[in-house]
Amino acid sequence: MRPQSIDEVAHRVRQFYEACSFPGYEEVETPFDLAEKAGRGVYMQLLDRQLPWSARVLDAGCGTGQLVNFLSMMERRVVGIDLWYNSLRKGQVLKERFELGSARFVQMNGVLHHTADAVRR
């Protein structure tokens, strides 16, 4: 079996994330539901406690933007970037539904993801 080129791997990864963007928002019907979901995670709890409401935040590799939307609920200015349009679209739909004006989503590459040795790369 021949090794795959970087382009072949990138193509397969793109296909996967465009077909299977996660996590979803199925159980989120209100901003309260999003806050409750966030409250179940230690990482989101710690960030929420430590970031002032006036903070400017960049979430590189934001996926579906749950952290972006959650942090923006307290008027923090939060920008989420990700390479995958379908993931960003889920975050944008929720943002618009709840009128979370301080959240922004931008499609671009900006994260080292699943890199075994980032220093060498």
Image (cartoon, grey):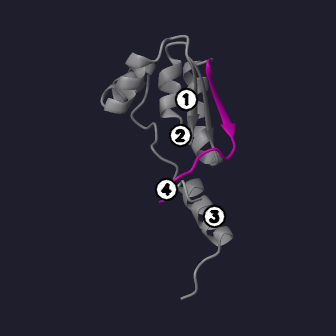
Alpha-carbon span between mark 3 and mark 2: 19 Å
Q: Position of residue 32 (x, y in %)?
A: 39, 19
The tag earlier along the polypeptide, 1 or 2, is 2
Alpha-carbon span between mark 3 and mark 1: 28 Å
Q: Amino acid at mark 1?
A: Leu
Alpha-carbon span between mark 1 and mark 2: 10 Å
The tag earlier along the polypeptide, 3 or 1, is 3
The disc placed on residue 117 is none
Residue 33, visible in the rendered structure: no
Asked if disc 1 and disc 2 are in contact, CB closer than 8 Å, the reply is no
Residue located 39% across and 28% down the image: 44
Residue located 34% across and 24% down the image: 36
User: 10 Å neighbourhood of mark 3: few (<14), some, or many (≥20)?
Assistant: few
Circle 1 sits in a helix, a strand or a loop, which is it? helix
Towards the viewer: 57 or 82: 57
Quadrant of the rendered image containing residue 108: top right
The tag earlier along the polypeptide, 4 or 3, is 3
The tag earlier along the polypeptide, 4 or 2, is 2
Q: Amino acid at mark 2?
A: Thr
Alpha-carbon span between mark 4 and mark 3: 13 Å
**Residue that label 1 marks:** 94
**Residue that label 3 marks:** 10
Asked if disc 3 and disc 1 are in contact, CB closer than 8 Å, the reply is no
The disc placed on residue 64 is 2
User: 10 Å neighbourhood of mark 4: few (<14), some, or many (≥20)?
Assistant: few
The disc placed on residue 114 is 4
Decide whether residue 108 is among the magenta residues. yes
Towards the viewer: 14 or 9: 9
Residue range in magenta is 102-116
Circle 4 sits in a helix, a strand or a loop, which is it? loop
